[in-house]
Amino acid sequence: MSENTKQPHILISNDDGYLAPGLLALVNAIRPLGRVTVIAPEQNHSGASNSLTLSRPLSIHRVAGGERDGFLFINGTPTDCVHIAMTGFLDEKPDLVISGINQGENMGEDTLYSGTVAAAVEGVMFGVPGIAFSQIDKGWNRIEDAAKAAHDIVAQMLVSKLAHSEGAATLLNVNIPNRPYADLYRWRVTRLGNRHHSQPVVVQKSPRGELIYWIGAAGDAKDSSEGTDFHAIDDGCISITPMQLDLTHHARLAAMRANGWDRG
C-alpha cells in the first residue's frame, strides 16, 4: 500500500472510562475509517479538565476478549492517556485524536472543565488534530445514532483540508442531540455560548457529622443567541465549534501596552 493510500491512524480516548457505552459505540463507528487505537481511563474522570497525574506512576492494561478486546486503559486522566500515547507509548503520532462520546453536553464554559475536550486538546498540543464528541442528554439514549453521526463528521474531517488550518492542528468540539440518526443530518458551525454561574454548592453532613460539599449543577444558558452552540442544539442541530489553545486576550494586550503597562 502506498503512502498516499495508507489508512489514517486514529487514537480514541474519553473521560467516562473504558467501559463506557459511548466509547464502545464511537470505536465501532470509526473503525471503517482507519486503524484505531483505544487508550482510555480506567475510571470515570468527568470534570478532570487537562490534569496530568504527577504524584504516582501510571500503568497500562489491555483488555483481552469480549467486545472491548484490545482496548487499553490507564489508571489516570484523559490527558494522561493521550500524553503517554504521544510521548513514547506509540511508535509514531496518530493522524487524529478523537474523544468521547461523552455522556452529557459540553457547551459554553463546560469546555474548560471537560475531560472529554481535554483529551482532544492534548492531541492538538502535540500537533495532531482533535475532535471531542458529546451527547446532549445523559443516559446513553440513542448512542448508536450519535456514533453514526460522529462517523460522518470524522469522515468529513479526513477528506477535507481542515485538519491543519493556518499551520495549526484543528480542534473541534461537537455536541450531538439524542435523536434518531435520520434527524442528525443538520450540522451547524458555531461559537461557544456561555452560562450563568453554577448552582450553589450542596452542603451535607457525613455519617461522622462532618460537613461535606458537592459541587452544584452547571448554570443555565446565558448567551444562547443565534450562532452559539446552545442555539444550534435548541434547534435540533449538531453543533460543531472550532476552538483554539491561544487564551491571550489580544485586544486587551494592545490596550494595556497603549496605557503604559509595559515597563522595561
Image: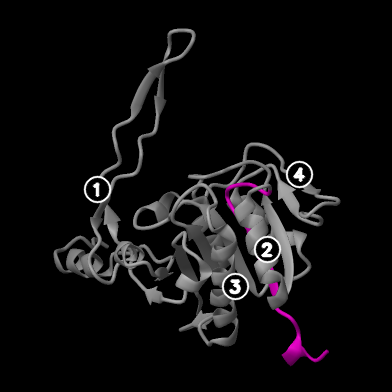
C-alpha distance separating marks 3 and 4: 30 Å
Query: Relative to 41, is 253 above or below?
Result: below
- Tag 4–tag 1 contact (CB < 8 Å): no
What amino acid is labelled 1 in the image?
His
Residue linked to disc 1: 196
**Secondary structure category for the residue under label 1:** loop
Residue 146 seen in the figure: yes
Residue at figure coordinates x 55%, y 82% from the top left: 156
**Secondary structure category for the residue under label 2:** helix
- The tag on residue 151 is 3
Percent x, y of residue 174: 46, 66
- The tag on residue 27 is 2
Looking at the image, residue 216 sits to the left or right of residue 165; the answer is: left
What amino acid is labelled 4 in the image?
Ser
Percent x, y of residue 104: 46, 51
What amino acid is labelled 3 in the image?
His
Check if residue 248 falls in the magenta segment: no
Q: Which residues are magenta?
A: 1-18
146 or 207: which is nearer to us?
Answer: 146
